[in-house]
Amino acid sequence: MSKPIGSNVGEWRVGHQGRDSMYYEEFHDGEWRHLRLAGEMLVGTPHYVIYFGSGDDWKKQPAWACDRRDEIIARIKSACPIPDYRYSGEGVLGESDYAYLIEAAGGLDETLCAWRGCNAHAVHGMCLCVRHAYRDAW
């Protein structure tokens, strides 16, 4: 296992495990509990994608982690932030993530999102709003 890339010293830590996976660990009752996540090295920025999967996929994680998906994902995202990391999975982006992605793209265009029935403005240089452009990609 590699040196952690982010942590709350003595409580939890996150790091890369090999080329295409990540780990999340937390200290509980005198030992480290381990959670392995799929990932993939990319070329350029972002340099890595973390696959969180769907809420149903998460239920296959160890019992101690099953009901704590949002908390654990928030910790991992704090250690592995956009733009260096990309997230994939159901409901992993929050309002601050969307705001960052809009700002990084240069704002919003006057045109509306091309997604059928969507009335939000498209991200600059794209034909989709931020929620549709990044619905499962970040």
Image: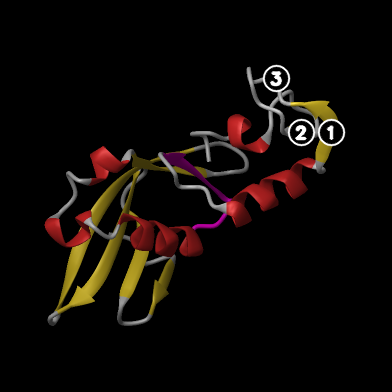
Taking 14 as reference, is 42 above or below it? above
Instruction: State which tag comes first along the sequence, 3 or 1.
Output: 1
The image quarter containing residue 132 is top right
Instruction: State which tag comes first along the sequence, 2 or 1.
Output: 1
Q: Residue at x 80, y 34 (%)?
A: 124
- On the rendered image, what quadrant is the N terminus found in? bottom left
Instruction: State which tag comes first along the sequence, 3 or 2.
Output: 3
Q: Which residue is mark 3?
A: 114
Label 3: state its secondary structure.
Answer: loop
The image quarter containing residue 122 is top right
Which region of the structure is painted magenta? Answer: 80-89
Between the residue at mark 2 and the residue at mark 1, the CA separation in whole angstroms equals 6 Å
Q: Residue at x 32, y 48 (%)?
A: 18
Label 1: state its secondary structure.
Answer: strand
Q: Which residue is mark 1?
A: 109
Residues marked 2 and 1 touching at CB (< 8 Å): yes
Taking 41 as reference, is 34 above or below it? below
Q: Is residue 83 magenta?
A: yes
Image mark for residue 121: 2
Give coordinates of residue 100: x percent, y percent: 68, 52
Which amino acid type is shown beneath numbered disc 1? Answer: Asp
